[in-house]
Image: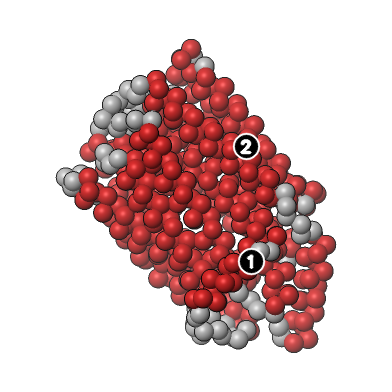
Amino acid sequence: MSQTLGNFIMFFGTSIMGISGSLVGIAVAISSLWDGVSDPLIGHLSDNCRNKFFGKRLGFMLFGIFAISLINILIWSMPSSLSQSGKFVWLLLCLLAIETCNTCYGTPFAALGIDMAPDYNEQSKIQGFKTVFSIIGMILPSVLMYFFMPSISIGIQTDFSQSGYINIAYINSALVLLFGMIAIFGSLRHIRKNKNIFIQNFEKEKFDLPKLLSGYLDILRKKDFRSVILGYSFATIASAFLTGVGMHLFTYCYHFSSSQISVILITLFGGAIMSQPLWVYLAKRLDKKRSLIISLSTIVFGIFMTVMTFLFRSYIPIETMFYIAMPCMFFCGIGAGAMYSLPFSMYADVVTMEIFKTGKNNAGAYTGFFTFTYNIANSIALLLIGFLLDIIKFDSTQPIQAISVQNGLGMIVFFGCSIFLSLAILVFSQYSIKRADVLKVQLILNRNGENNNF
């Protein structure tokens, strides 16, 4: 569901529903900003929840999946008869609602992973397994797009195309319910078995917004927190440029059909899945920071290869270009695979070190701070993308865009990705936690747990 929104909402709003790029950018940016604000709030509430049946996290997750499933369908069912301002309001309200409910599920879910596996190597493993299944979920919208969207390249049949998105939304919502219930009730027995950790452990704190805000500023002053949070935020901005404008690029510049675009996306995420064992191995062999920097450099090289295809697209037949673009995207996917696991594993290590120093398990709030920052970055990127689409004079009513518009789309994607990936490499390089540091702290925590039921 999240990947469908991330990949297609900008294209859906501008090319299918005819909303201006600026308005779509504003709606997505506001909702993303609110998502960031709500993350530490929900994280704090879940840290201090003491439900005897669901523990800290699962009650929030249960509410989230049911609400998400309903609102997701409403987003794609936007009435085409509404005015542009009416469509903007519909989109904004639905996005605000779904981001709120997604936070109720996503932030406690991320904290649950830290609660269950604080061990250094176990974090890499659990994040690796989560990543594989997450990327399968990311590939699924592209597979559904292949079967449910009309295979068109130039010219958009609005009603037919919207019906395809609605059908995809029904399937996504059903899957959210199914796998959300598996995650919740699959974790329930483990949580109830370890009530001292998940239900009774740590003193409950009253909600204090000024204290929460000051806590956010405090962690940004700490180098390792800052390097992971900001590094991942820059990488998120790069991803927003690719996913936010990628559909426009492949449709209006390469003139690929929707079926070809879905195969391109499947190839991208397929590379990310297949690379998971590689990054887990390199994280053990070289440590997490070096592996992550290698992965980001791999993406930059993949972007460079794609730039070459863009420059020569007018001289190569569409079918041939399609087969040339696929390995470029696969190479980018291999590099991107590490971004779905290593930053979260590194952040879990930082949180473990902080828990050791303070004696307080505020994993939910820390996770909220993390998502708050990269959601702000994402909102800024999407707002900028919306305005850039208007600046280059992208016109959804024109099936064939002017060469200047096509070049503008290419510049938005390639320069946006390259600049912010380079910034991410620079920031991640400041990370200083070593494997030995975490293992030493975890040994002490385990001893305390044996002696004090910690």
Q: Above or below — where is 5 with respect to 365? A: above
The residue at which mark 1 appears reads as 219
Q: Above or below — where is 176 with respect to 143? A: below
**How many numbered callouts?**
2
On the picture, is 449 further left or further right than 416? right
Outermost residue on the top side: it is 315
Visible residue check, residue 207: yes
Using a 10 Å C-alpha cutoff, classify the residue at mark 1 as few (fewer than 14 neighbours), some (14 to 19) or many (20 or more). Answer: some
Residue 131 in the image: state x and y as whole percent.
59, 52
Residue 356 in the image: state x and y as whole percent.
73, 75
Judged by depth in the image, the label closer to the viewer, 1 or 2, is 1
Residue 246 in the image: state x and y as whole percent.
45, 35
The residue at which mark 2 appears reads as 299
Mark 1: which amino acid? Ile
Residue at (67% x, 55% y) in the render: 227
On the picture, is 431 further left or further right than 144? right
